Image: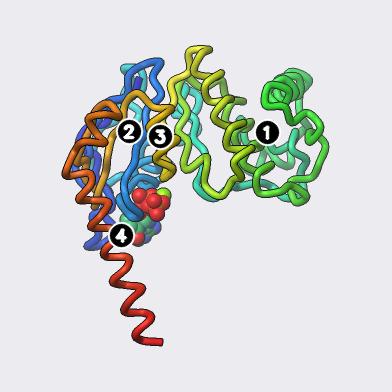
Amino acid sequence: MLRVEGLCKHFGGIRAVDQCSFEIAKGSISALIGPNGAGKTTAFNCISRTMEPTAGKVWLDGKRIDHLKPHKVTRLGLSRTFQITRSLEDLTVLENLCVQATSHGFARLVGPSISEEERAKAEEILDFLGISRLAYEQARNLSYGQRKLMDFAALLMSDPKIILLDEPAGGVNPRLLDDIVEHIRALHARGLTVLIVEHNMELVMSLCEHIVVMAQGRVIADGPPDAIKANPEVLEAYLGASTAAEETSDAEAAHV
Ligand SMILES: Nc1ncnc2c1ncn2[C@@H]1O[C@H](COP(=O)(O)OP(=O)(O)OP(=O)(O)O)[C@@H](O)[C@H]1O
Ligand SMILES: [Mg+2]
């Protein structure tokens, strides 16, 4: 469903994504994991074309997408969430879904209101996610967890073939987490391909059949959960990262 070859994104001297290659099988639930700063979000940005990569090729269901505008990529069936939730605060949840779905920019916002078809679709998705009661709530009034669900709902408006989720479990309470996991499984059962960036290892190991591990911009491991768990390089990357973080906080503490 997704093939990434030699993907690179450099910010000046920082190689945020460095020669990344991996494939995500149709109908799978896969994860892209790695320590903070590994380049996961940047890779998502480059794949979904919200960021111009420095180099690399990306195929979606056999078609090259690495030269397309983000809305074209969405139209071809790839939909992604953002690590930090984004919404139009003054609009209702239903309006947010419809606006974000097609996102034809400003003209869309000042243009005619939502079509009946879009409204029906948004209502169906909100119902599927069990948040119909929030349809006419302004986004500004939503809790963090409700925003996550709204993002999730918006993702489905474009009838995606594959969804890229950036830390769906980040900062949500255990009950909502269960809820989100259940929805991911239900979507997968309907044939959707799912790629998740997530730090919650328990969730990743139980949900995903295939894991790609990044560290310092590079893919360092790729395989099923058991192989990844037993991979010394992966362990090293995580331990190295936490040691570095500890050293930084030690240094900060010493400084204080
Ligand atoms: N716009 C940018 N300009 C400069 N450097 C950036 C930019 N975006 C990301 N980086 C750098 O690129 C590297 C990878 O960042 P990225 O956000 O992709 O990591 P991540 O794996 O998603 O981390 P996390 O798990 O913390 O979300 C980091 O060193 C980061 O500081
Ligand atoms: Mg990130």
Residue indicated by mark 4: 242
Residue indicated by mark 1: 97
Question: Mark 3 belongs to which amino acid?
Answer: Val
Precedes in sequence: disc 2 or disc 1: 2
Is label 3 in contact with label 2 (beta carbons under 8 Å)? no
Q: Nearer the viewer, residue 74 or 218?
A: 218
Residue found farthest to the bottom: 256
Residue indicated by mark 2: 66
Which of the 4 image quadrants contains residue 220?
Answer: top left
Q: Position of residue 174 (x, y in %)?
A: 59, 41
Q: Position of residue 23 (x, y in %)?
A: 27, 25
**Label 1 element class:** helix
Other residues around mark 4 within 10 Å, as few (<14) / some (14–19) / many (≥20): some
Is label 3 in contact with label 4 (beta carbons under 8 Å)? no
Residue 46 visible? The answer is yes
**Label 3 element class:** helix
Q: Nearer the viewer, residue 17 or 198?
A: 198
Precedes in sequence: disc 3 or disc 4: 3
Residue indicated by mark 3: 204
Q: Report the residue at 32% width, 68% height from top.
A: 246
Position of 234 with respect to 201 (left or right) is left
**Label 2 element class:** loop
